[in-house]
Image: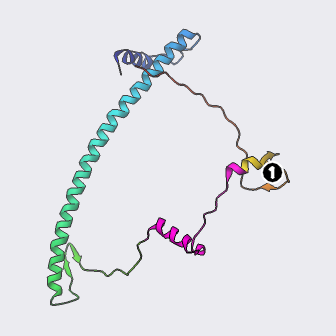
């Protein structure tokens, strides 16, 4: 934000609430103030993002260090458990701060979605594919129109699940980009 925008921002914050725009000159003044507020928003967002990035970088570093330390201790505990298992195959480590044991995982399947779908189609096993059903809204809009609050096509079929949405108008203020 440059000095002129800062001056405009200072003036905008002290503007009386009863101020009224009644000419092109006052509209130009108001747009300058509006643009200064946009510039201030951009500055605030940039500063906040820099702080967020810095904090996230610190957090990620701390979490990675903790993860590395946990991995180190898991390795040591696992080695000790394997030593105990040489004499007792069902041994486990129990301490006041936690336990260490092993758990069997059932054999499973690693899926590669793209390759799997291609293979199923190539072999004609399409009964093994699911098809996601969803309305083709563009085609529906071409065939149906609202009549007395109901969505009807030219054959008189009424489509449930579609309600008319009123058109609304909104104010759009587009300040030019400052240099």
The residue lying at 30 percent from left, 80 percent from top is: 103
Q: Position of residue 83 (x, y in %)?
A: 14, 83
- Is 157 rendered above or below residue 108? above
Q: Position of residue 176 (x, y in %)?
A: 48, 21
Q: Residue furthest front?
A: 122
Q: Position of residue 16 (x, y in %)?
A: 49, 16
Asked if residue 11 lies in the magenta stretch, the reply is no
- Is 20 rendered above or below residue 46? above
| Side (left or right) of 23 relative to 112 | right
Q: Residue furthest right?
A: 155
Q: Determine whether the residue tagged by mark 1 lies in a helix, strand or loop.
A: strand
Asked if residue 119 lies in the magenta stretch, the reply is yes
Q: Which residues lie in the magenta part? A: 111-139
124 or 171: nearer the viewer:
124
16 or 178: nearer the viewer:
178
The colour scheme used to paint the residues is: rainbow
Q: Position of residue 77 (x, y in %)?
A: 17, 74
The residue lying at 20 percent from left, 71 percent from top is: 74
Label 1: how many Cα within 10 Å (few below 14, some 14–19, many 20+): some
Examine the rendering and report whether any part of residue 149 can be seen.
Answer: no
Examine the rendering and report whether any part of residue 141 can be seen.
Answer: yes
The residue lying at 64 percent from left, 59 percent from top is: 134
| The C terminus - image quarter | top left
| Side (left or right) of 29 relative to 79 | right
61 or 138: nearer the viewer:
138
- Is 159 rendered above or below residue 120? above
174 or 142: nearer the viewer:
142
Provide the residue designation for mark 1.
Answer: 152
* Numbered label tally: 1
| Side (left or right) of 6 relative to 22 | left
């Amino acid at each position: 934000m440059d000095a002129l925008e800062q001056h405009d921002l200072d003036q905008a914050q002290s503007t009386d609430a009863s101020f009224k725009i009644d000419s092109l000159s006052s509209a130009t003044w108001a747009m300058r103030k509006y643009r200064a507020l946009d510039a201030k928003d951009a500055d605030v967002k940039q500063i906040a993002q820099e702080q967020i990035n810095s904090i996230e970088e610190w957090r990620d570093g701390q979490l990675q260090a903790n993860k590395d330390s946990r991995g180190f201790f898991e390795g040591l505990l696992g080695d000790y458990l394997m030593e105990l298992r040489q004499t007792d195959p069902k041994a486990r480590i129990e301490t006041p701060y936690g336990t260490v044991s092993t758990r069997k995982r059932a054999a499973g399947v690693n899926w590669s979605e793209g390759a799997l779908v291609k293979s199923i189609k190539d072999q004609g096993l399409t009964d093994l594919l699911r098809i996601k059903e969803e309305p083709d809204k563009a085609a529906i809009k071409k065939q149906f129109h609202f009549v007395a609050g109901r969505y009807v096509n030219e054959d008189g079929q009424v489509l449930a699940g579609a309600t008319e949405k009123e058109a609304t108008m909104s104010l759009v203020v587009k300040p030019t980009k400052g240099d």
